[in-house]
Image (cartoon, coloured by chain):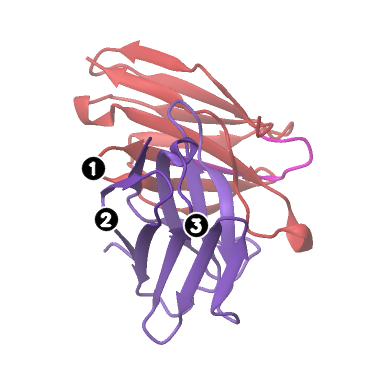
Chain colours: A purple, B red
Amino acid sequence: QQQVKQSPQSLIVQKGGISIINCAYENTAFDYFPWYQQFPGKGPALLIAIRPDVSEKKEGRFTISFNKSAKQFSLHIMDSQPGDSATYFCAASRPVGYSTLTFGKGTMLLVSP
Amino acid sequence: DSGVTQTPKHLITATGQRVTLRCSPRSGDLSVYWYQQSLDQGLQFLIQYYNGEERAKGNILERFSAQQFPDLHSELNLSSLELGDSALYFCASSVPGTSNTGELFFGEGSRLTVL
């Protein structure tokens, strides 16, 4: 059972455009929702994260929008740049401490110059 | 550089063989996680250790086993290898206890190719 569903699988955006990646989860016990960025040949690295007590979190050009009732959250990349080309994973976990992250299957983003 | 070290970076072996992947967590991190990354399944959680004890188990096959040693490094053992075990294996670590923000720090992975 896939607990975190991510779409699209791949995405091509022109430089300066907005990249949007969506995720949906099933487990209402999840309370931590991070996004990880992975460049080729590297391990994933935390990009931005949100908890369900807020509906939006912004860090620079990256914004997470969170809809608790719909059990959905999304990553928006404003003014997308070629350097943003990477694979993006959404994830979710139950209360922090010893819980583990469940990842979506990833979105390959290509920002064309 | 995340501070998590994984060896070897690349490994090519034959079906039926056994391999060991090694991970050194960031200094001070007590938890070690193993993930398998394949094109069709994404990042699949295998197993977690905390200060030497198994803490959580995910989709880990019975042919696979892991342990965390007193110096906190961890090893993932893969045996009776099959073609389908070819994948990237990631180790991650996290800050212990109340300082844990939930962030995982990933190594650069070990790419296993089974021929």
Dot 3 amino acid type: Leu
Q: How many angstroms separate mark 2 from mark 1 (CA)?
A: 14 Å
| Tag shown at residue A101 | 3
Give the residue at x 51% y 66%.
A64
| Helix, strand or loop status at disc 3 | loop
Q: Quadrant of residue B110?
A: top left
Q: Is residue A29 magenta?
A: no
User: Is residue B30 depicted above or below A96 in this figure?
Assistant: above
User: Numbered disc 3: what chain?
Assistant: A
Q: Amino acid at mark 1?
A: Asp
Q: Residue at x 49, y 36 (%)?
A: A83
Residue at the image position 50 percent from the left and 16 percent from the top: B8
Q: Nearer the viewer, residue A39 or A71?
A: A39
Number of other residues with Cα within 10 Å of mark 1, as a class: few under 14, some 14 to 19, many 20 or more: few
Q: Give the vertical position of B20 relative to B96 (above or below).
A: above
Residue at the spot of label 2 = A8
Residue type pointed to by label 2: Pro
First in sequence: mark 2 vs mark 3: 2
Numbered label attached to residue A102? none
Chain letter of the residue carrying label 1: B
Q: Residue furthest bottom?
A: A69
Question: Is the same chain shared between marks 2 and 1?
Answer: no
